[in-house]
Amino acid sequence: MKMQVCLVLVLVVTLAVVNAQVPHWGSCPEPSTQPNFNFKQFMGRWFEITKLPAQFEKGRCIETNFTLKFDGTARVVGSEILNGKVKRIEGTAVVEDQKNPAKLGISFSYVLPYTPYWILSTDYVNSAVVYSCTDILRIFHVDFAWILGRSRSLPAATVDRAKEIFIKNNIDVSWMITSKQEGCEKHLENLDAGAYL
Ligand SMILES: *[C@@H]1O[C@H](CO)[C@@H](O)[C@H](O)[C@H]1NC(C)=O
């Protein structure tokens, strides 16, 4: 039995490291979220401005497009440019707790459970502060944090204010990295042109 627990732990830690996530001891923090969150107003296109954890540079021009569906959930399309190609993944976002509609869950596959996607703060039109944390056996947790923008860049003061929100909620964002959002439109134009050849 002990052996099995050890194996699970090793596996989880390995997965966390492979994904370049930073595991932290203890269970997840419980940050405050956006009061009276309006799911509909959150729909549309969001660009990734900065993120946690600091991981290897993978794709660039990362964005997420939320579209409301008739059943009240949202279609989520994440896209990035990786090795010169546009990669897309599609999933579903739901309000998991009607009492706290800012606590969304996102799943990119029918077989996977919903991953927390908590809107700590947003003004819907400029920026959003998003946090995701998963407890592992209540021994440690792995987390993700994003600052999103309605445009590909945000004023430094806006990014600083967003970081303050994480810090206030005991979320360590010292390893946040800026996402690359340069030369995206040009690249996408070229791709569109290519589609007609
Ligand atoms: C976002 O998704 C909607 C619905 O699928 C689509 O009509 C729209 O063009 C998308 N926007 C972008 C920028 O990809």
Image: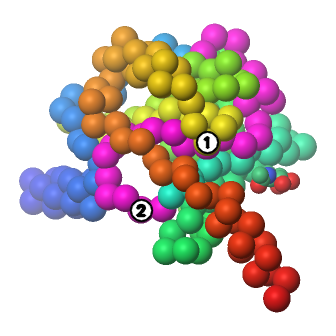
Disc 2 crowd, CA 10 A, few/some/many (<14, 14-19, 20+): few
> Can you tell which mark lies on residue 152?
1
What element does badge 2 sit on?
Answer: loop
Q: Is residue 8 above or below residue 93?
A: below
Disc 1 crowd, CA 10 A, few/some/many (<14, 14-19, 20+): some
Note whether residue 106 is visible.
yes
Magenta region, residue range: 34-59
Q: Is residue 57 magenta?
A: yes
- Considering the image in quadrants, where does the C terminus appear? bottom right
> In front here: 176 or 30?
176
What element does badge 1 sit on?
Answer: loop
- Please tell me which residue is depicted at 34% across the width and 37% down the height of the picture: 176
Residue at the far bottom in the pictured view: 197
On the image, which quarter does residue 41 sit in?
top right
Question: Of marks 1 and 2, which one's residue comes earlier in the chain?
Answer: 2
The reply to whether dot 1 and dot 2 touch (C-beta < 8 Å) is: no
> In front here: 113 or 167?
167
The location of residue 192, given as percent across then percent down, is 78, 72
- Considering the image in quadrants, where does the N terminus appear? bottom left
> In front here: 155 or 147?
155
The location of residue 168, given as percent across then percent down, is 37, 11
Amino acid under disc 1: Arg
- Please tell me which residue is depicted at 21% across the width and 60% down the height of the picture: 14
The location of residue 5, given as percent across then percent down, is 17, 53
The location of residue 98, given as percent across then percent down, is 69, 22
Q: Which residue is mark 2?
A: 58
> In front here: 164 or 22?
164
Number of on-image labels: 2
- Please tell me which residue is depicted at 57% across the width and 37% down the height of the picture: 153
